[in-house]
Amino acid sequence: MKSIMRKSMLYKTGVEYGDYTMNHVLGCAHGCKYPCYAFMLKKRFGQIKSYEDWLEPRIVSNTLELLRREIPRLKNKINSVQLCFTTDPFMYGYDEIIEMSFASIKLLNEFGIKCTVLTKGILPEQLAGLSPKNEYGITLVSIDETFRRQIEPGSAPYGERIAALKLLHDRNCKTWVSIEPYPTPNIIQQDIFEILHAIEFVDRIVFGRTNYSRNVSSYQHHKDFYNECAMMIRDFCKEHGIDCYIKRGTLNL
């Protein structure tokens, strides 16, 4: 696959539940059409020319070299490192990215740094052999495969994502799910409880609305819809002993 070089890797993120992050790939073959904020951001700043360009990921070939240089300088400031906010660390079908992500997590763990992972790919079982402080998560906004093929065309099937996450849970890893960006009923008719029951084994659920979408803003009752969903998720999490986080801007009280 194509590769690029960078001058730095670790940086402090402005995302509300993040600390430090790293993005060791430019682009994402999953091709999400929510729309994808990462794609819009990279295109805006001229790093990506088009959607087709975005679908051809470039791995940062000097990732481990940068981490070895930056970790000693930053380790006392870092609480955790998230992989990733503008790409996917376990991109479906890309072994080079998967191997680089695993090596990066292992290296960060060797310095006592916790990693938080979020993917629409398949979490490798080998992650269970790394630090027990790590947290492994998947994005899951539906369990309808027809919808996935339309909106996340290059990503891993929902069932495979859940199965890999459950395997890590059964190996005593901390697991979580991001139900974001959750679609409104004019985009897909579905029962959120079907998603919740499929992931009731996890330690944490994060819920967030869909942003930057005309389909959502044109749905007359989107504010009430997200309020109701958030309340249902909170109640479900309380009942099942799951930590719950509702992202800012999702509730309209």
Image: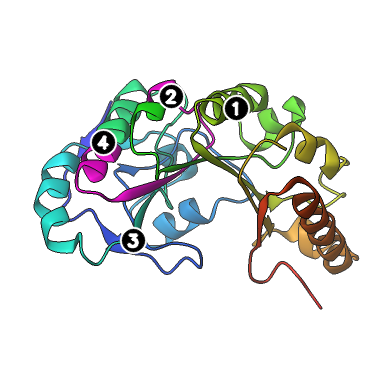
In the rendered image, which quarter contains the N terminus? top left
Labelled pair 3, 4 in contact (Cβ < 8 Å): no
Amino acid type, callout 3: Asn
Residue displayed at 31% across by 31% down:
102
Numbered mark located on residue 124 in the image: 2
Q: Earlier in the sequence, mark 3 or mark 1?
A: 3
Labelled pair 3, 1 in contact (Cβ < 8 Å): no
Spatial CA distance of label 3 from label 4 is 16 Å
**Quarter-wise, where is residue 77 in the image?**
bottom left
Above-or-below relation of 177 to 162: below
Numbered mark located on residue 166 in the image: 1
Question: What residue does disc 3 label?
Answer: 79
The residue mark sitting in front, 2 or 3, is 3
Spatial CA distance of label 3 from label 1 is 26 Å
Spatial CA distance of label 1 from label 4 is 21 Å
Q: Residue 118: within the magenta? A: yes
Spatial CA distance of label 2 from label 3 is 24 Å
Q: Find numbered disc 2 in the image and state the secondary structure of the residue it sits on.
A: loop
**Quarter-wise, where is residue 224 in the image?**
bottom right
Spatial CA distance of label 2 from label 1 is 11 Å
Q: Find numbered disc 3 in the image and state the secondary structure of the residue it sits on.
A: loop
Q: Find numbered disc 4 in the image and state the secondary structure of the residue it sits on.
A: helix
**Furthest residue in direction bottom, as rendered:** 253
Q: Earlier in the sequence, mark 1 or mark 4?
A: 4
Residue displayed at 47% across by 51% down:
39
